[in-house]
Image (spheres, rainbow, N blue to C red):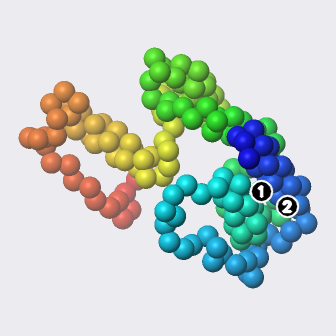
Amino acid sequence: MGQDELLRRAAEAAIAYLEAVDERPVRPDPAADLGPLGGPLPRGPTDPEHVLRLLDDVAAPATMAMAGPRFFGWVVGGSYPVALAADWLTSAWDQNTMAAAATPGTVALEAAALRWVVEATGLPEGTWGAFATGTTMAHVAALGTATTAVLGRAGWDPVADGLFGAPPVTVGHAVRGAAR
């Protein structure tokens, strides 16, 4: 099976999944046999068609219908057709959006989205941000930013001077009754 046919079949499977999401139970199928997903590490490449069949026939029944209108568990986004199509396209691009010299198109898209977030939330002009790959990286970025801000207030520039020799930073709990 060629690349084009594989991608068409994946798109057809995704479309079929979304078309049936309103009729299927929200919960994963408790009888789904996930055994075929395990096993030893393959000794070589696996047939792409086999991988696609495993995803569609074995894993899909064991998914929760989060894309459907009856799912109220978490706010995880939405599977609107335009969002899914954009995700497919950007996944095909496979860009590392870290430098405008390498990926100017996706850097411009990210900058526009950040401007819209600032505007929609009423944050002051000049507010900046970045998109993180997940919660862990968002926490690391937030801690780094907070450390820089706290040390800056103490007269220390961690960007220029590093952290060795910096004043100690105390992290504690809010004091009961303190203004918030």
Going 83% across and 64% down the picture, which residue do you hit? 70
Residue 169 lies, in percent from the top left, at: 20, 49
Going 15% across and 48% down the picture, which residue do you hit? 168
Vertical placement of residue 92 versus 54, above or below: above
**In this orientation, which residue lies closer to the viewer: 35 or 115?**
35
- Residue 102 left/right relative to 153: right
- Residue 77 left/right relative to 112: right
Q: Is residue 72 visible?
A: no
Residue 38 lies, in percent from the top left, at: 57, 72
Mark 1 — residue? 67
Question: How far is the residue under mark 2 from the one under mark 1?
Answer: 7 Å
**In this orientation, which residue lies closer to the viewer: 151 or 29?**
29
Going 57% across and 35% down the picture, which residue do you hit? 94
Residue 135 lies, in percent from the top left, at: 48, 52
Mark 2 — residue? 21
Instruction: Find residue 166 and report its image quarter.
Output: top left
Vertical placement of residue 56 versus 1, above or below: below
Disc 1 residue type (three-letter): Ala
Q: Earlier in the sequence, mark 2 or mark 1?
A: 2
In what element is the residue under mark 1? loop
Vertical placement of residue 25 versus 48, above or below: below
Going 49% across and 62% down the picture, which residue do you hit? 43
Q: Is residue 139 visible?
A: yes
Disc 2 residue type (three-letter): Val
- Residue 103 left/right relative to 10: left
The answer to whether the residue labelled 2 contacts the one labelled 1, judged by CB atoms less than 8 Å apart, is yes
